[in-house]
Amino acid sequence: MSDSQIYTYARKDFQAFFHMGPDGTPQTVSAGGVPLVFWPDGRWCIEVNLYLQRCYEAGASHFGDKGGTLGTYAAYLTHLVRRCFNSGLTDFSQLRHSHFRSFVVGLNADKVWKNGRQVSRRNSETQEKTVCVWLDFLDFVGEFAAIPDFVSKNGRIRAYKMPYKKKVGRNKTTVGMKWSWERRPLRRRVTRRQLPITDGQFGKLKRAADALTTNPFIRRRRLTMFVLFDSVGLRRAEMAMFTVQCVRNAIRDLEAADERGDKDFIPMLRFSTVKGEDGERECPISRVNLRYLESYMLKFRLPLVSRKNTGEALSGPLFVNSKNGKELTHNHFTQEFHLIRKLCGMKEKGSPHMMRHRFITKLFVRLILAHNLETKGELRRLLLSTEAIKEHVREITGHASIESLEVYIHLAIDEVTEFKKTLKRITDLSGLALLSDARNRFASAVASQEDLRNASADLAVTVDEILRGFGKDIDYKNSEEWARFLEITGKKTAGEHESQLELR
Protein backbone atom coordinates (compact mmCIF):
# COMPACT_ATOMS: atom_id res chain seq x y z
CA MET A 1 0.00 0.00 0.00
CA SER A 2 1.50 3.34 -1.07
CA ASP A 3 1.45 6.57 0.95
CA SER A 4 -1.24 8.01 -1.31
CA GLN A 5 -3.46 4.91 -1.22
CA ILE A 6 -5.28 3.89 1.95
CA TYR A 7 -6.61 0.58 0.75
CA THR A 8 -5.05 -2.64 -0.44
CA TYR A 9 -6.30 -6.04 -1.61
CA ALA A 10 -6.45 -9.35 0.20
CA ARG A 11 -4.16 -12.12 -1.02
CA LYS A 12 -5.57 -14.58 -3.53
CA ASP A 13 -5.65 -17.35 -0.93
CA PHE A 14 -7.44 -15.19 1.67
CA GLN A 15 -10.37 -16.90 3.39
CA ALA A 16 -13.07 -14.79 5.09
CA PHE A 17 -15.17 -16.03 8.01
CA PHE A 18 -18.69 -17.01 6.93
CA HIS A 19 -20.41 -18.76 9.86
CA MET A 20 -19.92 -21.39 12.56
CA GLY A 21 -20.55 -24.98 11.54
CA PRO A 22 -22.80 -27.38 13.50
CA ASP A 23 -19.72 -28.83 15.18
CA GLY A 24 -18.50 -25.39 16.29
CA THR A 25 -15.77 -25.03 13.65
CA PRO A 26 -15.52 -21.75 11.70
CA GLN A 27 -16.62 -21.92 8.05
CA THR A 28 -14.87 -19.66 5.53
CA VAL A 29 -15.31 -18.57 1.94
CA SER A 30 -12.74 -17.48 -0.63
CA ALA A 31 -12.31 -13.70 -0.53
CA GLY A 32 -9.09 -13.17 -2.45
CA GLY A 33 -8.86 -9.71 -3.97
CA VAL A 34 -11.37 -8.12 -1.59
CA PRO A 35 -10.26 -4.52 -0.79
CA LEU A 36 -9.14 -3.70 2.77
CA VAL A 37 -9.42 -0.05 3.84
CA PHE A 38 -7.37 1.84 6.48
CA TRP A 39 -7.38 5.31 7.98
CA PRO A 40 -4.56 7.55 6.69
CA ASP A 41 -2.65 6.92 9.96
CA GLY A 42 -2.69 3.17 9.30
CA ARG A 43 -5.51 2.13 11.65
CA TRP A 44 -8.12 -0.38 10.50
CA CYS A 45 -11.27 1.40 9.21
CA ILE A 46 -13.88 -0.87 10.78
CA GLU A 47 -17.10 0.63 9.41
CA VAL A 48 -15.93 0.80 5.79
CA ASN A 49 -14.64 -2.77 5.85
CA LEU A 50 -17.88 -4.03 7.40
CA TYR A 51 -19.83 -2.22 4.68
CA LEU A 52 -17.66 -3.76 1.96
CA GLN A 53 -18.17 -7.16 3.57
CA ARG A 54 -21.94 -6.67 3.33
CA CYS A 55 -21.59 -5.75 -0.35
CA TYR A 56 -19.40 -8.82 -0.88
CA GLU A 57 -21.99 -11.10 0.76
CA ALA A 58 -24.66 -9.50 -1.45
CA GLY A 59 -22.73 -10.64 -4.53
CA ALA A 60 -20.66 -7.59 -5.51
CA SER A 61 -17.77 -8.57 -7.80
CA HIS A 62 -14.23 -8.59 -6.42
CA PHE A 63 -12.41 -10.06 -9.42
CA GLY A 64 -9.67 -8.39 -11.41
CA ASP A 65 -6.49 -6.57 -10.49
CA LYS A 66 -8.53 -3.54 -9.36
CA GLY A 67 -10.98 -5.43 -7.17
CA GLY A 68 -14.04 -5.28 -9.43
CA THR A 69 -17.12 -3.52 -8.05
CA LEU A 70 -15.79 -3.72 -4.49
CA GLY A 71 -12.58 -2.05 -5.60
CA THR A 72 -14.59 0.79 -7.15
CA TYR A 73 -16.58 1.24 -3.91
CA ALA A 74 -13.35 1.25 -1.89
CA ALA A 75 -11.85 3.93 -4.17
CA TYR A 76 -14.97 6.11 -3.79
CA LEU A 77 -15.11 5.67 -0.01
CA THR A 78 -11.46 6.54 0.56
CA HIS A 79 -12.28 10.10 -0.54
CA LEU A 80 -14.79 10.26 2.30
CA VAL A 81 -12.36 8.64 4.75
CA ARG A 82 -9.66 11.21 3.95
CA ARG A 83 -12.01 14.16 4.27
CA CYS A 84 -13.30 12.91 7.62
CA PHE A 85 -9.75 12.31 8.89
CA ASN A 86 -8.55 15.76 7.78
CA SER A 87 -11.55 17.30 9.58
CA GLY A 88 -10.72 15.50 12.81
CA LEU A 89 -13.64 13.06 12.49
CA THR A 90 -12.72 9.42 13.06
CA ASP A 91 -16.24 8.38 14.03
CA PHE A 92 -18.58 8.44 11.04
CA SER A 93 -21.64 8.56 13.30
CA GLN A 94 -20.58 12.09 14.37
CA LEU A 95 -21.03 13.50 10.87
CA ARG A 96 -23.51 16.32 10.35
CA HIS A 97 -25.11 17.61 7.19
CA SER A 98 -22.69 20.54 7.12
CA HIS A 99 -19.78 18.08 6.87
CA PHE A 100 -21.50 16.07 4.16
CA ARG A 101 -22.30 19.19 2.11
CA SER A 102 -18.73 20.52 2.31
CA PHE A 103 -17.33 17.10 1.33
CA VAL A 104 -19.61 16.98 -1.74
CA VAL A 105 -18.54 20.49 -2.75
CA GLY A 106 -14.93 19.40 -2.30
CA LEU A 107 -15.36 16.64 -4.88
CA ASN A 108 -16.11 19.20 -7.57
CA ALA A 109 -13.39 21.52 -6.29
CA ASP A 110 -10.64 18.95 -7.04
CA LYS A 111 -8.98 20.18 -10.24
CA VAL A 112 -6.31 18.92 -12.63
CA TRP A 113 -4.51 20.55 -15.53
CA LYS A 114 -5.62 19.26 -18.92
CA ASN A 115 -4.77 20.78 -22.32
CA GLY A 116 -3.46 23.92 -20.67
CA ARG A 117 -6.45 24.60 -18.40
CA GLN A 118 -7.85 23.46 -15.09
CA VAL A 119 -10.78 21.05 -15.21
CA SER A 120 -12.61 18.97 -12.62
CA ARG A 121 -10.74 15.80 -11.69
CA ARG A 122 -14.01 13.83 -11.95
CA ASN A 123 -16.85 14.28 -14.42
CA SER A 124 -20.39 14.86 -13.13
CA GLU A 125 -21.36 11.23 -13.59
CA THR A 126 -18.45 9.96 -11.48
CA GLN A 127 -19.16 12.58 -8.81
CA GLU A 128 -22.78 11.46 -8.61
CA LYS A 129 -21.83 7.77 -8.36
CA THR A 130 -19.29 8.60 -5.63
CA VAL A 131 -21.82 10.50 -3.51
CA CYS A 132 -24.41 7.73 -3.93
CA VAL A 133 -21.89 5.19 -2.57
CA TRP A 134 -21.15 7.57 0.32
CA LEU A 135 -24.84 7.76 1.17
CA ASP A 136 -25.26 3.99 0.98
CA PHE A 137 -22.34 3.66 3.38
CA LEU A 138 -23.61 6.35 5.77
CA ASP A 139 -27.02 4.70 5.77
CA PHE A 140 -25.21 1.52 6.84
CA VAL A 141 -23.37 3.51 9.56
CA GLY A 142 -26.71 4.71 10.95
CA GLU A 143 -27.92 1.11 11.12
CA PHE A 144 -24.61 -0.08 12.62
CA ALA A 145 -24.62 2.66 15.30
CA ALA A 146 -28.38 2.27 15.95
CA ILE A 147 -29.12 5.89 15.05
CA PRO A 148 -32.67 6.17 13.65
CA ASP A 149 -32.98 8.32 10.52
CA PHE A 150 -29.24 9.04 10.42
CA VAL A 151 -29.66 9.52 6.66
CA SER A 152 -33.15 10.74 5.85
CA LYS A 153 -35.05 13.74 4.53
CA ASN A 154 -34.89 15.49 7.92
CA GLY A 155 -32.07 13.51 9.53
CA ARG A 156 -28.50 14.38 10.44
CA ILE A 157 -27.54 13.78 6.84
CA ARG A 158 -30.35 15.22 4.74
CA ALA A 159 -30.73 12.82 1.85
CA TYR A 160 -33.39 10.35 0.83
CA LYS A 161 -34.24 7.75 -1.79
CA MET A 162 -36.81 8.46 -4.43
CA PRO A 163 -38.31 6.18 -7.09
CA TYR A 164 -37.28 6.46 -10.72
CA LYS A 165 -38.25 4.99 -14.06
CA LYS A 166 -35.77 4.19 -16.78
CA LYS A 167 -36.65 3.34 -20.36
CA VAL A 168 -34.96 0.13 -21.54
CA GLY A 169 -36.87 -0.51 -24.74
CA ARG A 170 -39.50 0.97 -27.00
CA ASN A 171 -42.35 -0.04 -24.72
CA LYS A 172 -40.50 -1.09 -21.57
CA THR A 173 -39.32 0.65 -18.43
CA THR A 174 -37.52 -0.49 -15.35
CA VAL A 175 -38.11 1.01 -11.91
CA GLY A 176 -35.90 1.42 -8.86
CA MET A 177 -34.78 3.80 -6.11
CA LYS A 178 -31.98 6.37 -6.25
CA TRP A 179 -30.48 8.83 -3.80
CA SER A 180 -31.38 12.49 -3.84
CA TRP A 181 -29.89 15.22 -1.69
CA GLU A 182 -30.05 18.94 -1.16
CA ARG A 183 -28.61 21.00 -4.01
CA ARG A 184 -27.86 17.93 -6.04
CA PRO A 185 -26.45 19.29 -9.32
CA LEU A 186 -28.59 18.80 -12.38
CA ARG A 187 -26.77 17.31 -15.33
CA ARG A 188 -27.79 16.63 -18.86
CA ARG A 189 -27.87 12.92 -19.45
CA VAL A 190 -25.43 12.00 -22.19
CA THR A 191 -25.80 8.63 -23.85
CA ARG A 192 -22.43 7.19 -24.78
CA ARG A 193 -23.32 4.01 -26.62
CA GLN A 194 -20.25 1.99 -27.45
CA LEU A 195 -20.80 0.25 -30.77
CA PRO A 196 -19.34 -3.16 -31.60
CA ILE A 197 -16.09 -3.52 -33.53
CA THR A 198 -17.03 -3.93 -37.19
CA ASP A 199 -15.93 -6.79 -39.44
CA GLY A 200 -13.53 -4.46 -41.26
CA GLN A 201 -11.96 -3.16 -38.06
CA PHE A 202 -11.64 -6.66 -36.62
CA GLY A 203 -9.98 -7.89 -39.80
CA LYS A 204 -7.52 -5.00 -39.69
CA LEU A 205 -6.62 -5.78 -36.06
CA LYS A 206 -6.09 -9.49 -36.80
CA ARG A 207 -3.92 -8.79 -39.84
CA ALA A 208 -1.78 -6.34 -37.87
CA ALA A 209 -1.36 -8.75 -34.95
CA ASP A 210 -0.37 -11.50 -37.38
CA ALA A 211 1.92 -9.65 -39.78
CA LEU A 212 3.44 -6.93 -37.58
CA THR A 213 4.12 -8.75 -34.29
CA THR A 214 7.75 -9.88 -34.34
CA ASN A 215 7.77 -12.15 -31.26
CA PRO A 216 6.29 -15.55 -32.32
CA PHE A 217 4.83 -16.30 -28.87
CA ILE A 218 3.18 -12.87 -28.53
CA ARG A 219 1.85 -13.12 -32.10
CA ARG A 220 0.14 -16.43 -31.42
CA ARG A 221 -1.10 -15.26 -28.02
CA ARG A 222 -2.70 -12.20 -29.62
CA LEU A 223 -4.39 -14.26 -32.34
CA THR A 224 -5.66 -16.72 -29.72
CA MET A 225 -6.95 -13.80 -27.66
CA PHE A 226 -8.92 -12.58 -30.69
CA VAL A 227 -10.38 -16.08 -31.23
CA LEU A 228 -11.69 -16.20 -27.65
CA PHE A 229 -13.04 -12.64 -27.66
CA ASP A 230 -14.82 -13.24 -30.96
CA SER A 231 -16.21 -16.73 -30.35
CA VAL A 232 -17.03 -16.66 -26.63
CA GLY A 233 -17.52 -12.97 -25.75
CA LEU A 234 -15.35 -12.92 -22.64
CA ARG A 235 -14.97 -9.87 -20.47
CA ARG A 236 -11.33 -8.86 -20.03
CA ALA A 237 -11.28 -10.02 -16.40
CA GLU A 238 -12.72 -13.37 -17.51
CA MET A 239 -9.98 -13.58 -20.15
CA ALA A 240 -7.34 -13.13 -17.44
CA MET A 241 -8.95 -15.90 -15.36
CA PHE A 242 -9.45 -18.29 -18.30
CA THR A 243 -7.48 -21.47 -17.57
CA VAL A 244 -5.78 -24.29 -19.44
CA GLN A 245 -8.18 -26.69 -17.74
CA CYS A 246 -11.14 -25.06 -19.54
CA VAL A 247 -9.60 -26.00 -22.91
CA ARG A 248 -8.56 -29.46 -21.76
CA ASN A 249 -12.08 -30.24 -20.52
CA ALA A 250 -13.63 -29.14 -23.81
CA ILE A 251 -11.10 -31.17 -25.83
CA ARG A 252 -11.78 -34.25 -23.68
CA ASP A 253 -15.54 -33.95 -24.23
CA LEU A 254 -15.06 -33.42 -27.98
CA GLU A 255 -12.84 -36.47 -28.38
CA ALA A 256 -15.23 -38.59 -26.32
CA ALA A 257 -18.06 -37.51 -28.65
CA ASP A 258 -15.96 -38.39 -31.70
CA GLU A 259 -15.23 -41.84 -30.27
CA ARG A 260 -18.93 -42.62 -29.83
CA GLY A 261 -19.73 -41.23 -33.29
CA ASP A 262 -21.79 -38.24 -32.11
CA LYS A 263 -21.62 -36.00 -35.20
CA ASP A 264 -24.07 -33.44 -33.75
CA PHE A 265 -21.94 -32.74 -30.67
CA ILE A 266 -21.21 -29.06 -30.00
CA PRO A 267 -18.04 -28.37 -27.94
CA MET A 268 -18.66 -26.20 -24.87
CA LEU A 269 -16.24 -24.03 -22.90
CA ARG A 270 -17.04 -23.69 -19.21
CA PHE A 271 -15.18 -20.90 -17.42
CA SER A 272 -15.30 -18.57 -14.42
CA THR A 273 -17.29 -15.37 -14.80
CA VAL A 274 -17.02 -12.12 -12.88
CA LYS A 275 -20.78 -11.62 -12.68
CA GLY A 276 -23.71 -13.78 -11.70
CA GLU A 277 -24.48 -15.92 -8.69
CA ASP A 278 -23.16 -19.21 -10.11
CA GLY A 279 -19.66 -17.87 -10.79
CA GLU A 280 -19.44 -19.83 -14.07
CA ARG A 281 -20.94 -19.79 -17.52
CA GLU A 282 -20.81 -22.07 -20.53
CA CYS A 283 -20.50 -21.12 -24.19
CA PRO A 284 -20.43 -23.15 -27.42
CA ILE A 285 -17.31 -22.95 -29.55
CA SER A 286 -16.59 -24.31 -33.02
CA ARG A 287 -14.35 -27.35 -33.44
CA VAL A 288 -11.88 -25.29 -35.46
CA ASN A 289 -11.53 -22.57 -32.83
CA LEU A 290 -11.21 -25.14 -30.06
CA ARG A 291 -8.40 -26.89 -31.93
CA TYR A 292 -6.74 -23.50 -32.43
CA LEU A 293 -6.79 -22.94 -28.65
CA GLU A 294 -5.33 -26.41 -28.19
CA SER A 295 -2.56 -25.67 -30.70
CA TYR A 296 -1.58 -22.47 -28.85
CA MET A 297 -1.68 -24.32 -25.55
CA LEU A 298 0.56 -27.20 -26.71
CA LYS A 299 2.97 -25.53 -29.13
CA PHE A 300 3.45 -22.09 -27.58
CA ARG A 301 2.28 -21.86 -23.98
CA LEU A 302 3.50 -25.27 -22.77
CA PRO A 303 7.17 -24.90 -23.90
CA LEU A 304 7.41 -21.36 -22.49
CA VAL A 305 5.80 -22.10 -19.10
CA SER A 306 7.79 -25.35 -18.78
CA ARG A 307 10.96 -23.25 -18.90
CA LYS A 308 9.92 -20.22 -16.87
CA ASN A 309 7.14 -21.27 -14.48
CA THR A 310 7.25 -25.06 -14.24
CA GLY A 311 4.64 -25.35 -11.52
CA GLU A 312 1.87 -24.16 -13.87
CA ALA A 313 2.96 -25.95 -17.04
CA LEU A 314 -0.15 -28.18 -17.07
CA SER A 315 -2.52 -25.84 -15.24
CA GLY A 316 -3.04 -22.18 -14.47
CA PRO A 317 -4.09 -19.34 -16.80
CA LEU A 318 -4.12 -19.87 -20.56
CA PHE A 319 -2.64 -16.43 -21.26
CA VAL A 320 0.72 -15.81 -19.64
CA ASN A 321 3.51 -13.26 -19.68
CA SER A 322 6.13 -14.00 -22.34
CA LYS A 323 8.97 -13.11 -19.93
CA ASN A 324 8.09 -15.09 -16.80
CA GLY A 325 5.24 -17.43 -17.77
CA LYS A 326 2.94 -15.97 -15.10
CA GLU A 327 -0.64 -14.73 -15.35
CA LEU A 328 -1.58 -11.43 -17.01
CA THR A 329 -3.68 -8.71 -15.40
CA HIS A 330 -7.03 -7.94 -17.01
CA ASN A 331 -5.78 -4.46 -17.94
CA HIS A 332 -3.13 -6.12 -20.11
CA PHE A 333 -5.78 -7.03 -22.70
CA THR A 334 -6.86 -3.39 -22.99
CA GLN A 335 -3.22 -2.43 -23.53
CA GLU A 336 -2.90 -5.10 -26.21
CA PHE A 337 -5.75 -3.55 -28.18
CA HIS A 338 -4.10 -0.14 -27.84
CA LEU A 339 -0.75 -1.47 -29.12
CA ILE A 340 -2.29 -3.39 -32.03
CA ARG A 341 -4.35 -0.34 -33.06
CA LYS A 342 -1.10 1.64 -33.16
CA LEU A 343 0.56 -1.08 -35.25
CA CYS A 344 -2.11 -0.89 -37.96
CA GLY A 345 -2.72 2.85 -37.68
CA MET A 346 -6.39 2.38 -36.80
CA LYS A 347 -7.95 5.67 -35.70
CA GLU A 348 -11.28 4.23 -34.55
CA LYS A 349 -11.70 3.04 -30.98
CA GLY A 350 -11.15 -0.63 -30.19
CA SER A 351 -11.30 -2.40 -26.86
CA PRO A 352 -12.07 -5.81 -25.30
CA HIS A 353 -15.56 -4.65 -24.33
CA MET A 354 -16.29 -3.58 -27.90
CA MET A 355 -15.38 -7.16 -28.88
CA ARG A 356 -17.95 -8.36 -26.36
CA HIS A 357 -20.53 -6.09 -27.99
CA ARG A 358 -19.59 -7.69 -31.30
CA PHE A 359 -20.04 -11.21 -29.93
CA ILE A 360 -23.51 -10.48 -28.52
CA THR A 361 -24.63 -8.76 -31.72
CA LYS A 362 -23.43 -11.72 -33.80
CA LEU A 363 -25.31 -14.07 -31.47
CA PHE A 364 -28.54 -12.22 -32.23
CA VAL A 365 -27.69 -12.19 -35.95
CA ARG A 366 -27.44 -15.99 -35.94
CA LEU A 367 -30.71 -16.22 -34.01
CA ILE A 368 -32.47 -13.98 -36.53
CA LEU A 369 -31.17 -15.95 -39.51
CA ALA A 370 -32.04 -19.28 -37.92
CA HIS A 371 -35.65 -18.21 -37.34
CA ASN A 372 -35.97 -16.10 -40.51
CA LEU A 373 -37.13 -13.07 -38.53
CA GLU A 374 -37.63 -9.76 -40.32
CA THR A 375 -38.21 -7.10 -37.65
CA LYS A 376 -37.14 -6.11 -34.16
CA GLY A 377 -40.66 -6.77 -32.95
CA GLU A 378 -40.62 -10.37 -34.18
CA LEU A 379 -37.30 -11.05 -32.50
CA ARG A 380 -38.41 -9.40 -29.27
CA ARG A 381 -41.64 -11.43 -29.23
CA LEU A 382 -39.65 -14.62 -29.84
CA LEU A 383 -37.34 -13.87 -26.92
CA LEU A 384 -40.16 -12.92 -24.56
CA SER A 385 -42.43 -15.83 -25.49
CA THR A 386 -39.83 -18.60 -25.59
CA GLU A 387 -38.34 -19.12 -22.14
CA ALA A 388 -35.74 -21.63 -23.37
CA ILE A 389 -34.33 -19.22 -25.99
CA LYS A 390 -34.42 -16.29 -23.59
CA GLU A 391 -32.52 -18.21 -20.93
CA HIS A 392 -30.08 -19.53 -23.54
CA VAL A 393 -29.17 -16.02 -24.70
CA ARG A 394 -28.88 -14.74 -21.14
CA GLU A 395 -26.66 -17.61 -20.02
CA ILE A 396 -24.31 -17.47 -23.00
CA THR A 397 -23.80 -13.71 -22.73
CA GLY A 398 -23.60 -13.68 -18.93
CA HIS A 399 -26.21 -10.94 -18.52
CA ALA A 400 -28.46 -10.67 -15.50
CA SER A 401 -31.61 -9.87 -17.48
CA ILE A 402 -32.91 -9.90 -21.04
CA GLU A 403 -33.66 -6.14 -20.81
CA SER A 404 -29.93 -5.39 -20.79
CA LEU A 405 -29.67 -7.05 -24.22
CA GLU A 406 -32.22 -4.72 -25.80
CA VAL A 407 -29.68 -2.56 -27.64
CA TYR A 408 -28.18 -5.59 -29.40
CA ILE A 409 -31.53 -6.45 -30.98
CA HIS A 410 -31.45 -3.15 -32.88
CA LEU A 411 -27.81 -3.65 -33.93
CA ALA A 412 -28.47 -7.22 -35.09
CA ILE A 413 -31.52 -6.28 -37.19
CA ASP A 414 -29.50 -3.51 -38.86
CA GLU A 415 -26.68 -5.94 -39.64
CA VAL A 416 -29.03 -8.64 -40.97
CA THR A 417 -30.81 -6.14 -43.22
CA GLU A 418 -27.50 -5.28 -44.82
CA PHE A 419 -26.32 -8.88 -44.74
CA LYS A 420 -29.32 -10.24 -46.69
CA LYS A 421 -28.33 -8.18 -49.73
CA THR A 422 -25.42 -10.58 -50.30
CA LEU A 423 -26.79 -13.70 -48.60
CA LYS A 424 -27.46 -15.54 -51.88
CA ARG A 425 -23.78 -15.36 -52.82
CA ILE A 426 -22.69 -17.12 -49.64
CA THR A 427 -23.01 -20.91 -49.39
CA ASP A 428 -21.77 -21.36 -45.85
CA LEU A 429 -20.63 -18.15 -44.17
CA SER A 430 -19.30 -19.82 -41.04
CA GLY A 431 -17.32 -22.51 -42.87
CA LEU A 432 -15.88 -20.06 -45.39
CA ALA A 433 -14.83 -17.64 -42.67
CA LEU A 434 -13.06 -20.37 -40.73
CA LEU A 435 -11.36 -21.69 -43.87
CA SER A 436 -10.31 -18.16 -44.81
CA ASP A 437 -8.73 -17.67 -41.37
CA ALA A 438 -6.86 -20.99 -41.72
CA ARG A 439 -5.60 -20.02 -45.18
CA ASN A 440 -4.43 -16.61 -43.92
CA ARG A 441 -2.58 -18.20 -41.00
CA PHE A 442 -0.82 -20.60 -43.42
CA ALA A 443 0.09 -17.75 -45.78
CA SER A 444 1.48 -15.76 -42.85
CA ALA A 445 3.61 -18.75 -41.79
CA VAL A 446 5.00 -19.02 -45.32
CA ALA A 447 5.73 -15.29 -45.50
CA SER A 448 7.52 -15.28 -42.13
CA GLN A 449 9.48 -18.45 -43.03
CA GLU A 450 8.21 -20.42 -40.08
CA ASP A 451 8.32 -24.23 -39.89
CA LEU A 452 6.28 -25.10 -43.00
CA ARG A 453 5.76 -28.69 -41.92
CA ASN A 454 3.99 -27.54 -38.75
CA ALA A 455 2.06 -24.88 -40.67
CA SER A 456 0.92 -27.48 -43.24
CA ALA A 457 -0.18 -29.86 -40.48
CA ASP A 458 -2.17 -27.07 -38.78
CA LEU A 459 -3.92 -26.27 -42.07
CA ALA A 460 -4.74 -29.96 -42.66
CA VAL A 461 -6.19 -30.36 -39.15
CA THR A 462 -8.29 -27.21 -39.61
CA VAL A 463 -9.71 -28.48 -42.92
CA ASP A 464 -10.48 -31.83 -41.24
CA GLU A 465 -12.49 -30.12 -38.52
CA ILE A 466 -14.46 -28.10 -41.10
CA LEU A 467 -15.22 -31.27 -43.09
CA ARG A 468 -16.36 -33.00 -39.91
CA GLY A 469 -18.99 -30.30 -39.61
CA PHE A 470 -20.38 -31.50 -42.95
CA GLY A 471 -20.41 -35.15 -41.80
CA LYS A 472 -17.11 -36.19 -43.40
CA ASP A 473 -15.34 -38.72 -41.19
CA ILE A 474 -11.73 -37.72 -41.79
CA ASP A 475 -8.81 -37.25 -39.44
CA TYR A 476 -5.39 -36.20 -40.66
CA LYS A 477 -3.83 -36.97 -37.25
CA ASN A 478 -4.64 -40.67 -37.70
CA SER A 479 -3.36 -40.83 -41.29
CA GLU A 480 -0.16 -42.29 -42.69
CA GLU A 481 0.89 -38.79 -43.78
CA TRP A 482 0.76 -37.57 -40.16
CA ALA A 483 2.81 -40.59 -38.99
CA ARG A 484 5.47 -39.90 -41.63
CA PHE A 485 5.49 -36.22 -40.67
CA LEU A 486 6.19 -37.11 -37.03
CA GLU A 487 8.89 -39.56 -38.05
CA ILE A 488 10.63 -37.07 -40.35
CA THR A 489 10.56 -34.18 -37.88
CA GLY A 490 11.53 -36.34 -34.90
CA LYS A 491 8.51 -35.22 -32.91
CA LYS A 492 6.84 -37.22 -30.17
CA THR A 493 3.89 -39.28 -31.21
CA ALA A 494 0.49 -37.70 -30.77
CA GLY A 495 -0.36 -40.32 -28.15
CA GLU A 496 2.73 -39.48 -26.07
CA HIS A 497 2.04 -35.77 -26.20
CA GLU A 498 -1.57 -36.20 -25.18
CA SER A 499 -0.75 -38.56 -22.33
CA GLN A 500 1.75 -35.99 -21.06
CA LEU A 501 -1.02 -33.43 -20.77
CA GLU A 502 -3.55 -35.98 -19.49
CA LEU A 503 -6.05 -34.72 -22.04
CA ARG A 504 -7.98 -37.97 -21.96
Image (tube, rainbow, N blue to C red):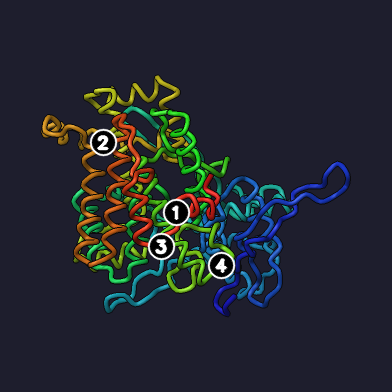
From the viewer's perspective, tell me whether residue 325 is left or right of residue 17.
left
What is the secondary structure assignment of the residue under circle 3? helix
The tag earlier along the polypeptide, 2 or 1, is 2
Residue 36 locus on image (x, y percent): 64, 64
Q: Is residue 268 above or below residue 237?
A: above
Residue marked by disc 4:
310
Q: How many residues crowd around disc 4 within 10 Å: few (fewer than 14), some, or many (20 or more)?
A: some
Q: Is residue 283 above or below residue 248?
A: above
- Distance from disc 3 to disc 1, alpha carbons, whole Å, reads 18 Å
Residue depicted at 40% across the width and 69% down the height: 121
The tag earlier along the polypeptide, 3 or 4, is 3
In the rendering, which numbered label is found on residue 300?
3
In the rendering, which numbered label is found on residue 493?
1
The tag earlier along the polypeptide, 4 or 1, is 4
The tag earlier along the polypeptide, 3 or 1, is 3
- Distance from disc 4 to disc 1, alpha carbons, whole Å, reads 22 Å
From the viewer's perspective, tell me whether residue 327 is left or right of residue 46.
left
Residue depicted at 38% across the width and 69% down the height: 120
- Distance from disc 2 to disc 1, alpha carbons, whole Å, reads 46 Å
